Amino acid sequence: MMTCQRCLMDCGKRAGIGFCRLQSKLCLGANAVGIQRLSKLNKRLEMQLLELRRIIEEKENIAEMAKVENEELSRENQDLRRDIERLRKEFTDLPTAPVSLEPPSPYGSPADPTPTEEQQLDVLSETPETAPNSKEEELSLECRHCHEWFPGITQDELGLHEDSHRLCPYCTLICDGVEQTIFEDHVFSHEV
């Protein structure tokens, strides 16, 4: 019969062996429960250990890939630097042509003042609508606030349009669609 040290100690205090047997069965049951708990804990720790090993292996793979990529980029960088040096040498070896500070003529080179056939056709194909400074542009007036063009209106009509804008007196911000309180807050913000 198996008894634990605790049971023997308890038996000395209590009367009879019957109690000791009962106590030893309880102790054996408690030991079995403890073993099961330890087994579960052991399994959980083993699972965590496996997971940590997997994570470490994954990190090592990532580090290896980063190392390989870094080496490839380094080689590519060296190749690009060699290309830049080669291009610099080629560029310095090129003969330099004199640069004219005059704008190019729309009719060809200054040595040949006659316009090309294509340029002559462009000038001949201009219509009054496409010609610069046509009469319609002269009749259009621009609002000085919103910069919108109004063809065919008088100066008085333009003045009415310009007066219809609600402007900040400090920064001339157009506040046409803004609520009055927001407009006032904006104006008063300049006084601070």
Image: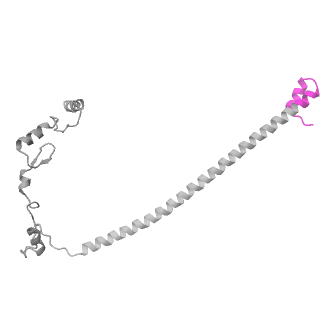
x and y, in percent, of residue 109 in the image: 10, 73
Left or right of 152? Residue 25 is right
Name the residue located 29 percent from the left edge and 73 percent from the top edge: 89
x and y, in percent, of residue 191 in the image: 19, 30
Name the residue located 50 percent from the left edge and 59 percent from the top edge: 66
**Quadrant in which residue 40 is drawn:** top right
- Quadrant into which the C terminus falls: top left
| SS assignment for the magenta stretch, majority | helix
**Quadrant in which residue 186 is drawn:** top left
Left or right of 103? Residue 83 is right
Which is more toward the observer, 185 or 137? 137
Name the residue located 21 percent from the left edge and 76 percent from the top edge: 95
Left or right of 93? Residue 134 is left
Number of marks in picture:
0
Q: Is residue 16 magenta?
A: yes
Query: In the image, which residues are magenta?
Result: 1-22
